[in-house]
Amino acid sequence: MHIERIPNLDAATGADLTLLLLESEQVENEQVESEQPPDSWQKRFGDAVDRAAEDARTTKKAAMFYAADGARVCVVVASEEDDEARRIAAAKGAAEALVLKAETVAIAADNEETIGACVEGFVLGAYRYLRYKTEEDAQWPGPTKLMVVADEGADSAIRTARIHAETTNLARDLVNRSPDETTPQGLGMLAKEAGEAVGLRVEVWDKPRIEAEGMGGLLAVNRGSVQPPAFIVIEHKPKGAVNAQPVVLVGKAVTFDTGGLSLKPTKDSMDHMKMDMAGGAVVIGAMVALARLGLPLHVIALIPSTDNRPGQDAYVPGDVVRMHSGATVEVLNTDAEGRMVLADALSYARRFDPQLVVDVATLTGAQVVALGLRVAAVITKEGEGADERIALFQKAGRATGDLVAPLPLFDFYKEQLESDVADLKNVGGGGAGTITAAKFLEHFTKDVHDTDDTGYPWVHLDIAGPAYGDTERGYHPKGATGFGVRLLASVLTDLAKV
């Protein structure tokens, strides 16, 4: 979508649809009438804009009218005075543009300082995934041009909003692809294409390289597949980076998860499992955002990728796997594969002496039970710096709408991972499944042979619930949501300011 700034509504010539976004205040949870539309709107469109604004406030839906000169206008009202409400309101306008097949859309807000959120919501709301559509009516890609009414001072906000939205849509595209196309090495090539286009260094390891590195967890999960695994390394290292130690992002990219020999049921389970690489897709999107934003931050991404299938040589319950760290893991459930591949990447991350490591994964069904489909779990090591790390992600969540809620990681949870035959087992038994999965991962953030090593600062994001949806909601489409790209971009932006 081409996006350009225009100085006023009079410059919106040729627009197939003009979208006007009003705010509506909230007082003690009761909606009160917001200010009247700006004089510039009334001058351009006449009294009809006032009536449409009142209709939009009353119905809480988009209100359409035609101006005297035939211009087609849509008024939407944000339910609250915050950026998330503005994004949702702009997405309502995008939905109207999709129905009307409006090629060119102009957008204006009564409060110009909020125009960034409006642009972000529109681009996110206009997303369509058409790769496999063959009928002509279904192939229209959506609006191709967005004209944004704002002055020059809004250029930075518009640019940031555009990058956040477009890289979120990139992650959506990666997750929505058919899994027979998104093989581990195929994902590596897609990451390479997207990363190198914006100046990132991208390396895709093949199976011999992974074997040489001793990534036993990744190789164990891959044993049942005919497709070789991949380990994707992406680096953003600009001149003048503010951090001497890199930030490391780790993304789980299980390109399809059958559960292995611990086979999943099909309905409402395996039929969604192309999304089990959403963590990796989010990290790819965040790295592209980082590069496009030009953040002065050294960041390395590690994305272990395989599918998990019950093939002839699949790993089995009872296997003991020697991991990259040297630790041994007793496998009791082959469907707990995500932690196996993440563990090797977290162990590998130690060599960078990182400032912070963040892993992102659709890791546990227990996360959905605990927090539902709209909020991700954020977990970090207890102790020094824990409150600050949680606060950093919660702040970013509130700013972007990618909400997170903290869960504890008390030391006693590791008792659920004790094994009779190995250093630990890959499932924690009944209760606290999201936490015990994180406790498993924590084991690999430090030198297992050095009892004094407390490991690097680490944050775990379990996005199992919000990564994929069965219904449209706000600016989130059915299918992949791209949840986490804007969250990470916001966190990285804050870290670049330090």
Image: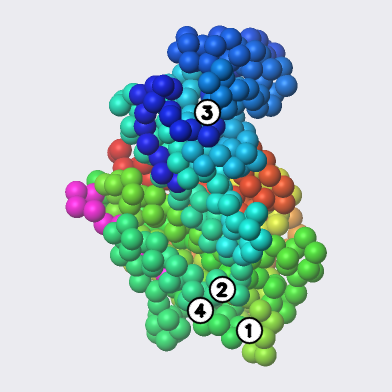
- Characterize the local packing of mark 1: few (<14), some (14-19) or many (20 or more) Cα atoms within 10 angstroms: many
Q: Dot 3 lies on which element?
A: strand
Which residue is denoted by mark 3 in the rendering?
A: 18
Mark 1 or mark 4, which has the lower sequence index? 1
- Characterize the local packing of mark 4: few (<14), some (14-19) or many (20 or more) Cα atoms within 10 angstroms: many
Mark 3 or mark 1, which has the lower sequence index? 3
Residue type (three-letter) at the residue carrying disc 1: Gly
Mark 2 or mark 1, which has the lower sequence index? 2
Mark-to-mark CA distance, 4 and 3: 48 Å
Residue type (three-letter) at the residue carrying disc 2: Glu
Residue type (three-letter) at the residue carrying disc 4: Pro
Q: Given contact means CB atoms under 8 Å apart, are the residues at marks 4 and 3 in contact?
A: no
Mark 4 or mark 3, which has the lower sequence index? 3
Q: Is residue 79 magenta?
A: no
Which residue is denoted by mark 4 in the rendering?
A: 229
Mark-to-mark CA distance, 2 and 4: 14 Å
Of badges 3 and 1, nearer the viewer stands: 3
Image location (x, y in percent) of residue 309: 66, 79
Residue type (three-letter) at the residue carrying disc 3: Thr
